[in-house]
Amino acid sequence: MQERAQDAQIKLEGRIAGPWTEELSRVWVEASPRVSSKRLVIDLRDVTYADAHATHLLREIYKQTHAELITGTLWTQSLAEVIKQGDQQKSEEL
């Protein structure tokens, strides 16, 4: 995670699954109090896979921060849409 005065960036790469999801969760729990007043950017350009737990975690982070999601491929664009739609799907079910 990179932090600047007004924003913070999380750059993710490769497969986000299993222990890597746990590591992302740990980093987020540690960093979230420091970045709560900043604009958060999540760089997904180099992500190649995200399991269900990773997607759920990213939805939770997005729900808390409304982070800017940076994509670079059709797959990461699709992942970003799934992350963003998490809130909409839950409200549509209610």
Image (cartoon, grey):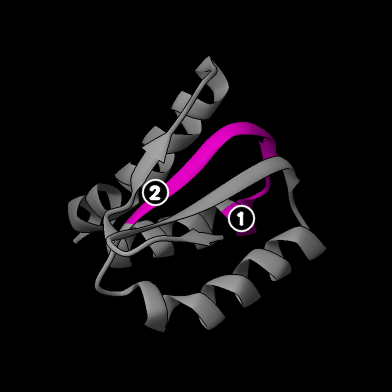
Q: Which mark is residue 54?
A: 1
Find the magenta span and give its range: 40-54
Task: Say which residue appears at 51% left-offset and 21% top-offset.
Answer: 72
Q: Residue furthest top?
A: 74
Residue placed at 68% from the left, 48% from the top? 51
Mark 2 lies on residue: 41
* Label 1: element kind: helix
Q: Which of marks 2 and 1 is in front?
A: 2
Report the amino acid beneath label 2: Val
The spot of residue 47 in percent (x, y) is 65, 35
Foreground residue among 25 and 33: 33
Q: Which residue is drawn at 53% across and 28% down?
A: 76
Q: Earlier in the sequence, mark 2 or mark 1?
A: 2
Residue placed at 53% from the left, 72% from the top? 28
**Residue 37 lies in what quarter of the image?**
bottom left
Q: Which residue lies furthest to the front in this view?
A: 5
Residue type at tag 1:
Ala
Q: Position of residue 57 (x, y in %)?
A: 52, 62
Quadrant in which the C terminus appears: bottom left
Q: Does the magenta stretch include residue 16?
A: no
Q: Is residue 23 above or below residue 77?
A: below
Quadrant showing the N terminus: bottom right
Q: Do the residues labelled 2 and 1 touch (CB within 8 Å)?
A: no
Instruction: Work out whether 53 lies above or below 14.
Output: below
Which image quadrant is residue 61 in?
bottom left
The foreground one among 74 and 41 is 41
Numbered disc 2: secondary structure: strand
* Left or right, 41 with reference to 6: right
User: In the visual, does 87 lie left or right of 72?
Assistant: left
Q: Position of residue 93 (x, y in %)?
A: 24, 55
